[in-house]
Image (spheres, helix red, strand yellow):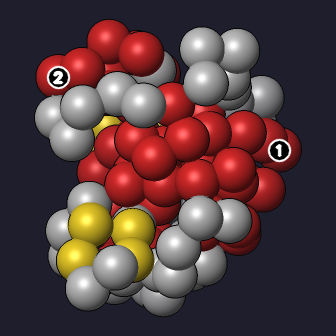
Amino acid sequence: MDKITRLSDAIMLGAMRRPQCHGYFFEHGGSCALGAAIDSTGVKEDYDELTRRFPELKRTMVSPIPLLSFRRQNLWEIIVELNDLHDWTRESIASWLESIGL
């Protein structure tokens, strides 16, 4: 678990463990994209610990959703929005992160 250094890898590996959920790290036996990262790395179900492990979550970026690219948000907010509001799969989120080097 300690060998995972990229957020995209953490999400992809965690997505293999359980189905996707929306709105919470974990719910009804599933995980969201950030929950998948928690699952695969063994960090506690805690925002602060997750951002210590992956400080890029606090990075300000633009969304990959073209209509939302006018506003800047923290990466963790973008991931939550993609998972919960735009129904991206965790694998799609991980692929996007990989495409931008994360």
> In this view of the protein, which residue sits in the foreground, 24 or 99?
24
Indicate the amino acid at tag 1: Ser
Is label 1 or label 2 in front?
2
SS state under label 2: helix
> Which of the 4 image quadrants contains residue 99?
top right
Q: Residues within 10 Å of mark 2 (few under 14, many from 20)?
A: few
List the single residue furthest toward the right.
Answer: 99
Mark 1: few/some/many CA within 10 Å (<14, 14-19, 20+): few
Q: In the rendered picture of this protein, how many numbered marks are placed on residues?
A: 2
- Residue for point 29% across, 51% down: 77
Q: Is residue 3 visible?
A: yes
For the N terminus, give its image quadrant. Answer: top right
**Which residue corresponds to mark 2?**
48
Q: Nearer the viewer, residue 71 or 1?
A: 1
Q: Is residue 98 left or right of residue 34?
A: right
Horizontal relation, residue 30 to residue 11: left or right? left
- For the C terminus, the quadrant is top right
Horizontal and vertical percent position of residue 59: 40, 24
Identify which amino acid the numbered label 2 is placed on.
Asp
Residue at image mark 1: 99
- Taking 24 as reference, is 30 above or below it? below
Q: Judge whether 49 appears above or below 96 on screen.
A: above
Residue 71 visible, this angle: no
Q: Position of residue 72 (x, y in %)?
A: 35, 43
